[in-house]
Image (spheres, rainbow, N blue to C red):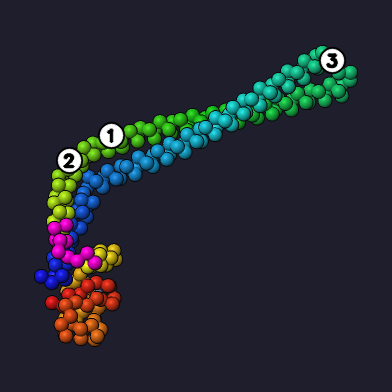
Amino acid sequence: MEQYELLWQYQQVDMELDRYEREMRGNSNRKELLKHRDFLLEQQNVLKKIEADVEMMGDRMDALADEIARLNNSVNEAAANFEANRPEDIEEAKKQIAAIQKLLGTISRYESELAKMRKDSEARDRQQREVRVRAAKARAEFDRIKLIYDEEYKVAVVKLEELKKKVAKEAEGIEPALLEKYMAIKRHCAQPITRIHGDRCGGCNMQLPAADMNKIRTGAPFVECENCGRIILAK
Ligand SMILES: [Zn+2]
């Protein structure tokens, strides 16, 4: 048999394999699994973000608590100093009291900031628990579908292997260079080899140039389409 006719037959089983692979990819349980997997990954990212926020807030809260403790010490020292060395005049007393009040004001500002952060941090904790519950549900659903899909896949893969063997068998007897050419065309055309339809390419329907039609009239078994690159069999 002509090499190009062998290649034509090869394409028939190769297309059958492609169709079956598409069918496997289109399996509804597989799609569901991918959906749940994507959702789980998304939840993991959300958790990471929350954890990073909580860590940053924790650092900030520690720093605020340290600062409040330091300011309280300063207030105590100032108060002790006021007691131990009574100011000599009323102006000096007012000045020292104002300094202490300023410290107390800062402490109170920091304390309300700290309280607000604690609340935010608690809200993040709640959010984290909610995300974990959602993710656990998705995980359970993923596991449930995975069991079903694994069984389906086991069956499907047997047929897939059979088809692959069939394709390999059809390849026997075809020159490797020709097969390589087929593969190269297949990278941009789903069906690399076609037949002539009147004076048109059976793949892209482009009219063949006169020179190619002449080749065919004088007995060339095939030409290559200038437009889509397919091999066009003359018969
Ligand atoms: Zn074409």
State the residue at coordinates (40%, 31%): 129
Label 1 CB, ligand 1: below 8 Å?
no
Residue at the extreme right: 88
Residue 102 on image: x %, y %:
74, 28
- Separation of marks 1 and 2 at Cα, in angstroms: 17 Å
Q: Residues within 10 Å of mark 2 (few under 14, many from 20)?
A: few
The residue that mark 1 highlights is: 140
Secondary structure that dominates the magenta span:
helix
Q: Is residue 66 above or below residue 53?
A: above
Q: Hey, which quadrant is residue 68 in on the image?
A: top right
Q: Which residues are magenta?
A: 168-177
**Mark seen at residue 85:** 3
Q: Earlier in the sequence, mark 3 or mark 1?
A: 3
In this rendering, the label closer to the viewer, 1 or 2: 2
> Which residue extends farthest top?
84
In the picture, which quadrant includes the C terminus? bottom left
Which kind of residue does numbered mark 1 sit on?
A: Ala
- Position of 1 compared to 122: left or right? left
SS at badge 3: loop
Residue in view at x 15 percent, y 82 percent:
219
Q: Is residue 186 visible?
A: no
| Horizontal and vertical percent position of residue 186 | 26, 65
| Residue annotated with mark 2 | 151
For the N terminus, give its image quadrant: bottom left
